[in-house]
Image: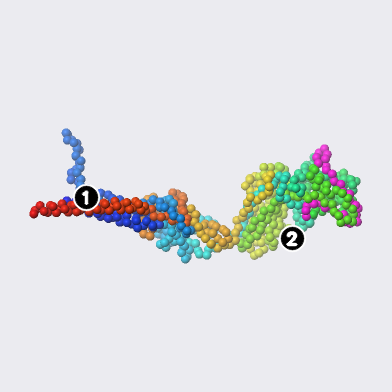
Amino acid sequence: MMRSLWAGVSGLQSHQIAMDVEGNNIANVNTNGFKYSRANFADLLSQTSKIATAPQGGLGGKNPMQIGLGTSIQNVSHIFSQGSVQNTDKNTDVAIQGDGFFIVSGDGGKTQKFTRAGDFKFDAKGNFVDNNGYVVQGWLRDEDTNQIDSTAPIKDINIPPGLTTPANPTSFIQLKANLNSGNQIVNKAPTYSSAEIAAGKNPDDFGVLFTGNGEAFNLQSYDGTAGGQGVYVSFDNGATTVAFRYTSNPNAVTSPTNTADGSTNYFRTTEDLRRQLEDLAKNQSNSAQVTINEQGKFQVSNSGAGSDLSITVSGISDANTQDNPLFTQAIGSLAGLLPANTTSVKLSQPIDAAVHSSSIDVFDSLGTKHTVRFDFRKTGFTATGGTSWTYAISVPQPGIIAGAIAPNENILEGGTIDFNSDGSLAQYNPPGITYTANNGSAPNQQIDFKFGTINGFDGITSYDSESATAGISQDGFPGGDLVGIRIDQSGTLIGSFSNGRSFGLAQIAMAKFANNEGLMSDGGNIFIQSANSGDPIIGKADSGGRGFINSSSLEMSNVDLSRSLTQLIVVQRGFQANSKTITTSDQMLQTLLQLKQ
């Protein structure tokens, strides 16, 4: 009789504990990162009245006779199922999607605690803390390498208030573009004028010759065995006629003194042709001049007291060479009578060169911005059939580029860039510049050019399509102040600065355990390690089985109210039934006591 009383009492006690567990679950239905608990019942040791016997002889075996002594709560388990993730308007809120825990500490990392509640914030000293004041643990950006090493020991995450980033001087310029290899050109500019050459422009950078409408002359070159295309010119109505033929070989260019009747002069640049024409014209009239104006037109003048000029121009067509009508037409505009002592001039058609320009702002050690400009000019073709270009680099005055020639020390000319016949990059030179801004910043700033991989197509190319810049970038930036922080899926705290730059400042560490249910609750949404949880396996989010991080989000409690309220009914009924066991046993005892009356 007493056993049923004590069994009822144990049932009441166990169901009271179960009620306490469910009450705690319901109380924390809105606690961020809370994991509900479950009370697990187990029966008590039974009293054995008779043991089991085996079958023997003609008798069958008998089962044991045991009388249970009640129930108890064997353990209370934390259920670490995923809670729902709710978006918030706070950029330092973080939620874990998957397994793992945030690591916090109140003593500089000596003692580690663990939580799923990611309601973090910065305190007055820049510590990244939870609502208990514990500092979130992770890795900080190395000031020397500017990298975050997630294999290093974790420490307090601290981002000082008023953080600034110093200026970073530009160390390279990366350019991706196409320089038109075709015969039809949209981007063109007049060939260098005589005034530009006198001011220091390199006459060798004349550019491949194009007519005004963008169609290339494509002059056939003299190669030593066959005469190149060109024109016959006379300044005395045919009395002395000289052939002027194009060559791509600079060593084959003829001195302008070779102007005898029937001779052949070889030119490579517009400046070569101009000097040779002027020499021939002066043989007829010592006041004659041949220049190239700012429109790229050859201009013949005869303003002094010399002789009249009677200019004739005709195309070259012989056994070795066919006439180039475009070039003949362009130079043929010079033809006609040009008397002495006249202000009149004779002009050719414009002779243009294929060009392309790109520019980008770079930064010095003070963070001051300067514009670097690249001016490309098509100059011909390589031996393998690819195009050849020159380029000039210019910077604003009073800045200077090492190697530039005075007085234009801010302009470095003579750069070359060649391409293979498939449009890939063959070579470029110079590979960079040494720049001094002359504004108090560090001098001799080295800026490398990244025009692409040799024989590759990842930088500047030369296809038969319009010249265009697809992308240009550099790695410099001015100093800036921290204006905001966001957190990505890996837990990296990315700082945004007033100079437009963003980079990682720190990274939140995460811990994973072999047995999450072995962790002990320490209050305040905090768990601590126990003997049965295993040691924390620390690493970055979204790796090694750890979940990823949702920013501007919080993980809600995983308490299911419908389950908990249903469980309340079950516990309540169990409690009532156990109380009935006690009252019934009491009534039976009362009946037993009444037997003596």
Question: Mark 1 belongs to which amino acid?
Answer: Leu
Tell me which corner region of the image, top left, top right, bottom left or bottom right, holds residue 249: top right
Judged from the image, the secondary structure of the residue bearing numbered disc 2 is: loop
Residue 152 position, x and y percent, is: 47, 55
Q: Residue at x 70, y 59 (%)?
A: 410
| Magenta range | 294-323
Circle 2 packing at 10 Å, graded few (<14), some (14-19), many (20+), is few
Q: Residue furthest bottom?
A: 124
Q: Determine which residue is flagged by label 2.
A: 407
Q: Name which quarter of the figure residue 501 lies in.
A: bottom right
Q: Main secondary structure of the magenta part?
A: loop
Point out the tag, 2 or 1, that comes first from the N-terminus.
1
Identify the residue position indicated by label 1 in the image: 69
Q: Would residue 483 appear left or right of 460 to someone viewing this image?
A: left
Q: Looking at the figure, which quarter contains the C terminus?
A: bottom left
Task: Point out the frontmost of discs 2 and 1.
Answer: 1
Q: Is residue 475 left or right of residue 42?
A: right
Image disc number at residue 308: none
What amino acid type should be assigned to the residue bearing mark 2? Pro
Q: Tell me: 252 left or right of 154.
A: right
Residue 232 lies within the magenta run: no
Q: Give the percent coordinates (x, y) of residue 543.
A: 46, 50
Q: Residue at x 43, y 50 (%)?
A: 98
Membership of 297 in magenta stretch: yes
Placement of 525 over or under 425, stated as above or below: below
Residue 146: percent from left, percent from top: 54, 57
Which residue shows up at 65% across the image and 49% down it? 177
Name the spot of residue 61 as percent of width and height, x first. Answer: 19, 37
Please say if 438 is above or below 300: below
Identify the element where label 1 is drawn.
Answer: loop
